[in-house]
């Protein structure tokens, strides 16, 4: 990933990545979702969500709320 971006969330489930994406974007946080799922074997791989370093703390707090922490 490019400099200035930090991974804040990783999941093997597409629906969880979509929920996190929607939550962060609705808060005005720009994100990048990196889909590392194997195209032949959908059970392998992860979805990683990256945010700009300056949005890291706010994004982590929102993800914690999503996870119920």
Image: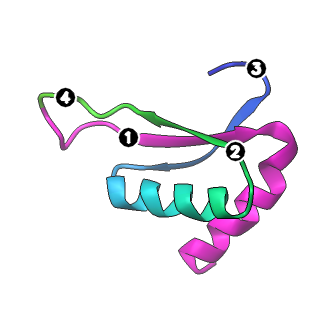
Q: Is residue 47 left or right of residue 9?
A: left
Up-down: is 51 above or below 18?
A: above
Residue positioned 69% across, 44% down in the render? 30
Residue 65 among magenta residues: yes
Residue 67: x, y in percent?
55, 73
Q: Residues within 10 Å of mark 1 (few under 14, many from 20)?
A: some
Q: Which residue is mark 1?
A: 46
Which residue does the image show at 65% across and 76% down from the upper left?
65
- Closest to the observer, 25 or 3: 25
- Write down the quadrant of residue 2 in the picture: top right
Q: How is the image coloured?
A: rainbow
Q: Earlier in the sequence, mark 1 or mark 2?
A: 2
Q: Nearer the viewer, residue 26 or 63?
A: 26
* Disc number for residue 30: 2
Is 45 included in the stretch rendered in magenta? yes
Helix, strand or loop under label 1: loop
Q: Which of pointers 2 and 4 lies earlier in the amino acid sequence?
A: 2
Quadrant of the rendering where the N terminus is positioned? top right
Q: Earlier in the sequence, mark 3 or mark 1?
A: 3
What is the span of residues highlighted in magenta in the rendered image? 41-69
Residue highlighted by disc 3:
3
Residue 62 at x, y percent in the picture: 69, 67
Query: What residue lies at 82% left-to-right and 55% top-to-bottom?
Result: 57
């Amino acid at each position: 990933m490019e400099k200035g971006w930090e991974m804040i969330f990783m999941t093997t489930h597409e629906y969880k990545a979509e929920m996190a994406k929607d939550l962060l974007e609705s808060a005005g946080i720009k994100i990048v979702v990196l889909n590392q799922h194997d195209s032949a074997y959908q059970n392998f791989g992860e979805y990683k969500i990256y945010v700009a370093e300056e949005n890291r703390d706010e994004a982590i707090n929102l993800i914690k709320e999503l996870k119920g922490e």
